[in-house]
Image (cartoon, grey):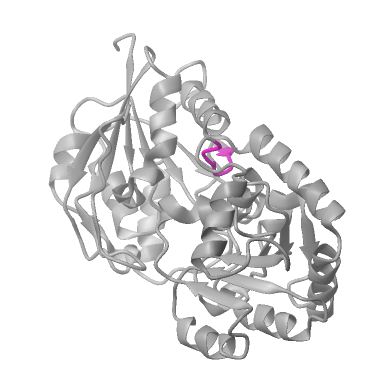
Amino acid sequence: MSSTRKLLSIGHSYVVNLNRQLINEIARLGKGEWEVTAVAPSFMHGDLRPIHLETDPNEICRLQEVPVYFSKPAHILTYDWRLKEIMAQGWDLVHCWEEPYVFAGGQIAWWIPDKIPLIYRTAQSLSKRYPPPFNWIEKYAMNRATGWICSGQIVAENLLSRPGYSLPMQLIPLGVDVNYFYPDHDAGLQIRRLLNWEEKGIPVIGYLGRFIPEKGLDLLMRVLDSLQTPWRALFVGTGTMESSLGRWAKRYPEQVRICTNVRHSEVPQYLNAMDILVAPSQTMSNWREQFGRMLIEAFACGVPVIGSDSGEISYVIQDAGLVVGEKDELGWVAAISDLLNSPSQRRELSQKGLERSHTFYTWPIVAKLHLQFFNEFFDGRSL
């Protein structure tokens, strides 16, 4: 083996350049020890919009594009044979940002050469019995895997007792770019002007994410209906509930704004227009919140956070925000009302969130944890 190890990281989410921040930070921190290449799709249909591979001339990692097929839904996404050719190019470790039970995860296990460590990143937060062929794929993939990474305590607890997962594992959170997400008063004022709101005055309750039932929008609308304290609400995202949210918003033409065409690069500006971010996620039979990236983005922007106790949210927030029972409608009314009426409490939570984002969730911290885990497979841990 050469003194520089070769890492290949594969993920369909890498089609978006911001989703390659982790692998670029790994390349930066591992310079001289790791040569890093990312594989990304040439094109994805995407959940919200078609996406052609977004490139960045300033990227540190090498980027290889590969055609994919059946990219909607992602469970049956498959990579072109070009990926098999890439995987045969003498890697020391393969990092797979694909679930081990989906077609793409199985492809990678099938195509990886013998004896090369294979590390999956998984976010399975519920114990599920997958139907054929997904159960067969998961079994095959985890038999071939060397280890796995997850981003939350709920996922770890779910998978540690699952057949096939008694392998080396590491719990590593998702990250946020604090050079990109940071408190920016002027940016927030610009968004408020754009929305035809006065720049100061009534606090803004913000929601960021998909407009779908499991994100708790029905509860949030009822809670806003019940508030006695003056409020404004900003919804940023898109999804199947867009129409019903729009019908509800007609009751509040001066108070509510719905923004559906916001690119991820614009999200920090919209977060800075909020005085509170709410994440009222609801556990469903087939879903519960796996992490809540919007929480750490709000932390980094200094926006106070209120989240439900669905899935991983309470672990992410801890004492840096407020956690309310996901079904506790009166509790939600009280929590939001208290923050609306207390600028001092908002300032306190703003500071706590900032500190938490910089202590646990910056990309250099998250990338360092990945490198430490990867190095264990060459520094004494048996394969």
- Is 233 placed left or right of 79 in the picture? right
Q: How far across and down, in percent of the image, does residue 254 sit?
A: 61, 81
Q: Position of residue 337 (x, y in %)?
A: 83, 71
Q: Indicate whether residue 78 is drawn in magenta.
A: no
Residue 326, above or below 151: below
Q: Is residue 109 above or below residue 33?
A: below
| Residue sticking out furthest to the top | 3
Tell me, yes or no, if residue 215 can be seen here: yes
Classified by dominant secondary structure, the portion drawn in magenta counts as loop
Residue 176 or 82: which is nearer the viewer?
176
Percent coordinates x, y for residue 84 in the rendering: 17, 42
Relative side of 132 to 195, left or right: left
Write down the region rendered in magenta. Answer: 170-178
Q: Quadrant of the N terminus?
A: top left
Q: Is residue 64 above or below residue 317?
A: above
- Quarter where residue 325 is shown: bottom right
